[in-house]
Amino acid sequence: MIEVYKQGIMLGVTVSEFESIFEHHLQSTLIQVKFHQLNNEIYFTTPKNLVRAKYIDSLLLNPQIENYSTLYSNDANSKIDILSNNLKLAQGWEFSKGQKEAINSMLSSSNKYIAVEGIAGSGKTTMLEQAKLLYESQGVNVIGMAFTGKAAEAMEL
């Protein structure tokens, strides 16, 4: 709506013309999400977001796991301790108890999907970066997904 308004203000459009242009803009660039209505409001998305959502759905619904392997809890703990000690020597920090427990749960789990949650700044992204290294050393392909833009941006780095 802001973009249409910016363009229309320069042309001196009336309110009814603005509403008509906005409605046309919605129909030409956005897709109405008919299955998701909350409080009787209609939601829209972009074609790009719809393609992304379908791709994520295909990942989640695919029953096959390529090159998936897990470690026994003791083996996972050994690898985590070695990595944590290396981080302490090289970068001056090590995993917290909670980070170690989360990585151990991931590495020793036979589940295809693992969810990690915690408050902002608790070290989730940092821990996941290191866990990814451990997974990849086991031959596991790791794909991260996030619900927020900030978390997704951090995973891209």
Image (cartoon, rainbow, N blue to C red):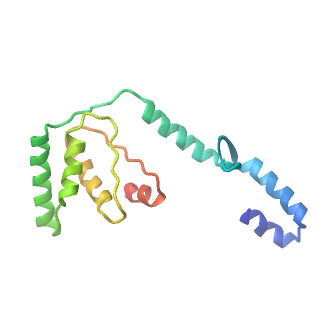
**For this rendering, which residue is in front, 32 or 46?**
32
Q: Residue at x 54, y 37 (%)?
A: 54
Pick out the residue farthest to the top: 63
126 displayed left or right of 49? left
Residue 26 point in image, percent of width and height: 75, 52
In the rendered image, the quadrant that contains the N terminus is bottom right
**For this rendering, which residue is in front, 52 or 44?**
44
> Which quadrant would residue 135 be assigned to in this image?
top left
Q: Residue at x 21, y 42 (%)?
A: 107
19 displayed left or right of 2? right
For the image shown, how many numbered marks are present on the structure? Answer: 0
In the rendered image, the quadrant that contains the C terminus is bottom left
Please determine whether, in this image, residue 3 is positioned above or below residue 141: below
Q: Residue at x 32, y 58 (%)?
A: 125
**For this rendering, which residue is in front, 114 or 156?**
114
Please determine whether, in this image, residue 51 is positioned above or below residue 90: above
